[in-house]
Amino acid sequence: MPRLFGAPELMPSGDGRLELFVFCDKLFVPLLRDWEGFLVTPDDFVASGERVVSLGAYSGIFKATGKAMTAPFAHAWIVRGDRISRFIQYTDTVKIREALSP
């Protein structure tokens, strides 16, 4: 049975979990198809016990509009043993929406 990963909120998933191949298909395939040079650049990590927060920025050029964007993010992880048991992302969605708009 494939491992399950927590799904970003933008992806409908019922119980909040997706099989790995579905996660990749719904996240990475559109990123590679729709964005040029899409990057996830972490700048800092803060850890305490099983909690980890990474701070950084997403960047890239949306191919359909040719608009570039840089949007800061915070990723909050809970790691139990050798598994990620929870992942929540926070980002400036206005910056992303601006790149998508004609």
Image (cartoon, rainbow, N blue to C red):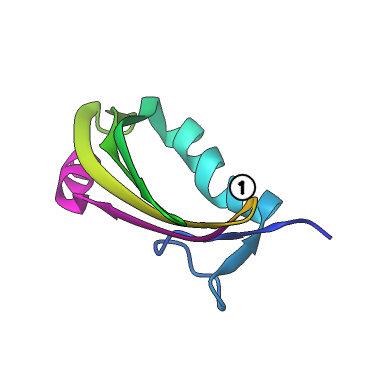
Q: Quadrant of the N terminus?
A: bottom right
Q: Nearer the viewer, residue 9 or 5?
A: 5
Residue 16 horizontal/vertical position (percent): 53, 71
Residue 88 horizontal/vertical position (percent): 38, 59
Q: 92 left or right of 76?
A: left
Q: Could you tell me the amino acid type at mark 1?
A: Asp
Residue 21 horizontal/vertical position (percent): 69, 50
Q: Which residues are magenta?
A: 84-102
Residue at (21, 52) in percent of width and height: 93
Residue extending farthest to the bottom is 15
Q: 40 left or right of 17?
A: left
Residue at (42, 35) in percent of width and height: 34
Q: Nearer the viewer, residue 26 or 45?
A: 45
Q: Nearer the viewer, residue 86 or 96?
A: 86
Where does label 1 land, which residue? 25
Q: Is residue 10 above or below residue 68?
A: below
Residue at (40, 64) in percent of width and height: 9
Q: Residues within 10 Å of mark 1 (few under 14, many from 20)?
A: few
Q: Quadrant of residue 35?
A: top left
Residue 72 horizontal/vertical position (percent): 21, 40
Q: Is residue 74 above or below residue 37?
A: below
Residue extending farthest to the front is 49
Q: Nearer the viewer, residue 31 or 58?
A: 58
Q: 21 left or right of 76?
A: right
Residue at (43, 55) in percent of width and height: 49
Q: Quadrant of the C terminus?
A: top left
Q: Quadrant of residue 98?
A: top left
